[in-house]
Image (cartoon, helix red, strand yellow):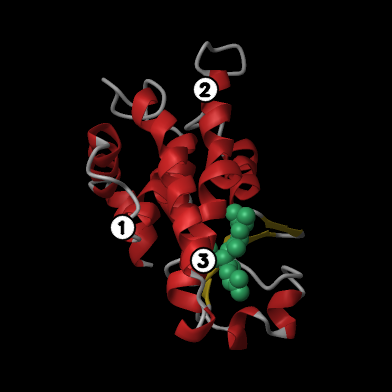
Amino acid sequence: MLKLHHAPNSRAGRIVWLLEELGLPYEINRMAFSPKDLKSDQHRARHPLGRVPVLEDGEVMIYESGAIVEYIIARHTDGALKPAVDSPEFPMYLQWFHYCEGMVMPPVNTIVVQTLLLPPDRRDATVLSQAQKLLTRAWEPVETALAGKEYLISRFSAADVMLGHAAFMSRRLGCVPETMPNLLGYISRIEARTAFQRGINT
Ligand SMILES: N[C@@H](CCC(=O)N[C@@H](CS)C(=O)NCC(=O)O)C(=O)O
């Protein structure tokens, strides 16, 4: 059975969400979001940087949330939640799927570090405000792309699992401006999905 190495309030929620959307059986190794669990020798043997998510599938051990999503779709479905390679929607599917970790999550990471993880005396207001500006700018093309659409392509897809989760996290950090109604509506639709709720509440 698929085994997900997990910590709460992390990108591991994306994988729970995907598994729930697909109705696949899985088990969870629950760890605390703390160095004691994540930086243990046992977990570093799964992920050298001691991060989550990590997926175990028999002999396979794989990390990077996007790679895990691709892996599950390729090995455990017959192409669910992904347009066919020759579909006109395939390029945009790929773009938004990778835009998540490529463009959105780097400033999100900085904001988390500068507002939650660092002790107050080590936080840097300039670094924080640069990251907030970068993140707002990164959402602008998504706001435009979502005009008149429910999801990133014409139906719910794994690109939404990636970027939708990042949008939810950004909103939680107070970094989705009220001037982006398409994105805010999109986040509400994401939040209404039962599988998503399981993903973030696991
Ligand atoms: N690009 C990686 C990022 C993995 C990552 O940074 N995960 C965070 C949780 S969202 C983590 O494990 N942080 C713990 C730490 O940095 O000690 C992915 O998408 O899986």
Answer above or below: position of 76 versus 81: below
- Image quarter for ligand 1: bottom right
First along the sequence among labels 2 and 3 = 3
Residue at label 1?
174
Quick one: 26 or 146, which is closer to the camera? 146
Residue at label 2?
92
Query: Tag 1's secondary structure?
Result: loop
Query: Tag 3's secondary structure?
Result: strand
The image shows residue 157 at horizontal and vertical percentages of 44, 32
Tell me what residue is drawn at x 77 percent, y 60 percent: 59
Residue at label 3?
27
First along the sequence among labels 1 and 2 = 2
Which is in the foreground here, disc 2 or disc 3? 2
Residue situated furthest bottom in the rendering? 36
Tell me what residue is drawn at x 30 percent, y 37 percent: 183
Query: Mark 2 and mark 1 in contact (Cβ < 8 Å)?
Result: no
| Mark 1 residue's CB less than 8 Å from ligand 1 | no
Quick one: 145 or 162, which is closer to the camera? 145
The image shows residue 80 at horizontal and vertical percentages of 50, 32
Q: Residues within 10 Å of mark 1 (few under 14, many from 20)?
A: few
Quick one: 182 or 127, which is closer to the camera? 127
Query: Tag 2's secondary structure?
Result: helix
Q: Looking at numbered disc 3 in the image, what kind of residue is underneath it?
A: Glu
The image shows residue 87 at horizontal and vertical percentages of 54, 12
Tell me what residue is drawn at x 60 percent, y 84 percent: 35
Report how far apart the C-alphas of labels 1 and 2 lie in the structure: 27 Å
